[in-house]
Amino acid sequence: MRSNEHASAGAAKKIPLGPQTPVYTYSPLVLSIPGRPVDLDVKVTAPATGTSLPIVIISHGQGMSNHLNSLEGYTPLAEFWAAHGFVVIQPTHLSSMSLKLQAPPGQEYYWQDRADDITRILDRLDIIEAAVPGLKGRWDSNKVAVAGHSLGAWTASMLLGAQNTDPRFGTVTDKLDKRVKVGIILTGTGKAGDELSEFGHKMVPFYGPDFSTMATPALIVCGDEDVSPHLTSRGADWHADCYYLSSGPKDLFWVKGGKHGLGGISGWDGKETQDEGPERLASVQRVTLAYLRTALYGDSSWDEAREALKGLAELGSIESKN
């Protein structure tokens, strides 16, 4: 973690931020999973000091980069959250380009196994705690958040209670895990059916979401310029469906000028980030951290961030529902 923020963080510096601590990373931690095509590799990033640390598990997206769609990605979020009091765990899902595995029929992108990876990690927290040097006795396994970006956002949504009905077979998938107390949904997925584009139907033929069952508290983060014609015929508002169609409590952060990369959350200087910008990234880092701090530490960070954003329209806006 850097001692100073990027010189171009700009107005995002006005969003309150507490002190940070150095972080360390342990990777890869290899978990043997019977029946899984390959072992489950995870990366753990933790603050060097502190106890009773909450846990955040990040589900990576499905971009076309060779490395970022794995445990190697999302360092801008993982290091930042860890520096401010969280243990961050990142799995490499079977859909990662780094593995180049062929998903079986009906399991495009290993979409169900992605959610299972999060459950597998939760089932093995004691193993992870014992394996990572300096971590024993320092976290609170009852305080768990799940975060996900793009396809990882759908993965996280399922852990938070969203269900899927495969339109081809009518099969209903429910991956709710009540051990997850709160979520961060980054560029979430929207309605299916006629809302998907022609290519979208081919890309995610399994996709038939029901967000009405997603009752776990969550922050949804969307870019107001995140138009995704490869998935939907609608505009950027499609990515906010998981906010509007789910029950509260939920919060929605619209990122001004944000596209699918939200300023660069998946990696430093990632070529697939069309909206790269240190100020935009810093605002996403700070707002998501504030939400996590209040949800899992119970402090006033979220109220302070919302109040600050009222005077920072150039960064974005927040709306909430109970």
Image: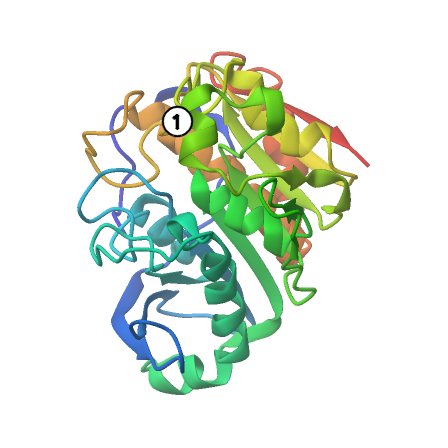
Q: Is residue 70 above or below residue 8?
A: below
Q: Position of residue 188 (x, y in %)?
A: 53, 34
Near-viewer residue (134 or 245): 245
Q: Amino acid at mark 1?
A: His
Kindly tell me whether residue 86 is visible in this rendering.
no
Near-viewer residue (115 or 291): 115
List the single residue furthest toward the front.
Answer: 169
Kindly tell me whether residue 214 is visible in this rendering.
yes
Q: Position of residue 6 (x, y in %)?
A: 26, 32
Near-viewer residue (107 or 247): 107
Q: Position of residue 155 (x, y in %)?
A: 51, 50
Q: Which residue is painted at 63% across and 46% down in the image?
A: 164
Residue 269 location, quadrant? top left
Left or right? Give the position of 278 relative to 159: left
List the single residue furthest toward the right.
Answer: 322
Near-viewer residue (110 or 74): 110
Left or right? Give the position of 18 relative to 215: left
Q: Which residue is painted at 58% across and 29% down in the image?
A: 190
Q: Which residue is painted at 70% across and 39% down in the image?
A: 211
Q: Position of residue 196 (x, y in %)?
A: 53, 23
Colour mode of the rendering: rainbow
Graded by Cα atoms within 10 Å as few (under 14), some (14 to 19) or many (20 or more), the crowding at tag 1 reads many
Q: Which quarter of the rendering shows the C terminus?
A: top right
Name the residue beneath numbered marker 1.
Answer: 260
As helix, strand or loop, the secondary structure at mark 1 comes to loop
Left or right? Give the position of 91 relative to 195: left
Residue 268 location, quadrant? top left
Left or right? Give the position of 152 relative to 220: left
How many labels, in total? 1
Q: Is residue 240 above or below residue 76?
A: above
Q: Is residue 313 above or below residue 105?
A: above
